[in-house]
Amino acid sequence: MSEDAKKLIRKLMEMDQNRRYSAQEALEDPWFKKVLEKVEVDRPLALQNLQNLKNFGVRIKASI
């Protein structure tokens, strides 16, 4: 595992919430930037998955 990957994981697992990476910070991390340069994203599929996650959260809240 690369040092960049290890640093990212440490930031994501930080106990102190003030020092822990947010989702946005994680996506801006050098490791993610390097990986995302190589990955071709199926944008329509990604948007559909995001919508599915949003709908899932709404259904959970409605059932509580």
Image: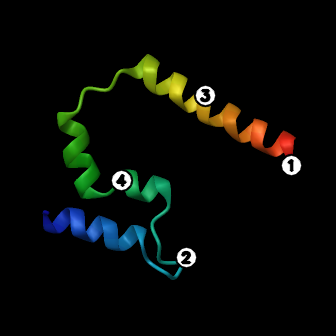
Spatial separation of the CA atoms under disc 1 and disc 3 = 21 Å
Crowdedness of circle 4 by 10 Å Cα count: few (<14), some, many (20+)?
Answer: few
Q: Amino acid at mark 2?
A: Gln
18 lies above or below 9 = below
- The mark found on residue 17 in the picture is 2
Q: How far is the residue under mark 2 from the one under mark 3?
A: 27 Å
Secondary structure under tag 4 reads: loop
Q: Earlier in the sequence, mark 1 or mark 2?
A: 2
Rendered location of residue 51, percent (x, y): 61, 28
Residues at circles 1 and 4 in contact by the CB criterion of under 8 Å:
no
Relative to 4, does residue 43 appear above or below in the rendering? above
The residue under the point 86% across, 49% down is 64
Kind of residue indicated by mark 3: Gln
Q: Are marks 2 and 3 in contact (CB under 8 Å)?
A: no
Identified by mark 4, the residue type is Glu
Q: Nearer the viewer, residue 62 or 23?
A: 62
- Name the image quarter holding the N terminus: bottom left
The label shown at residue 7 is none
9 displayed left or right of 22: left
Q: Which residue is mark 1?
A: 64
Q: Nearer the viewer, mark 4 or mark 3?
A: 3
* Residue 56 position (above or below residue 2): above
Please give the residue where the numbered disc 3 appears in the rendered image. 51
Distance in Å between CA atoms under marks 4 and 3: 22 Å
- The residue under label 4 is 28
C-alpha span from label 2 to label 4: 18 Å
Residue shown at 25% from the left, 40% from the top: 36
How many numbered marks have been drawn onto this rendered protein structure?
A: 4
First of labels 4, 3 by sequence position: 4
Q: Earlier in the sequence, mark 2 or mark 4?
A: 2
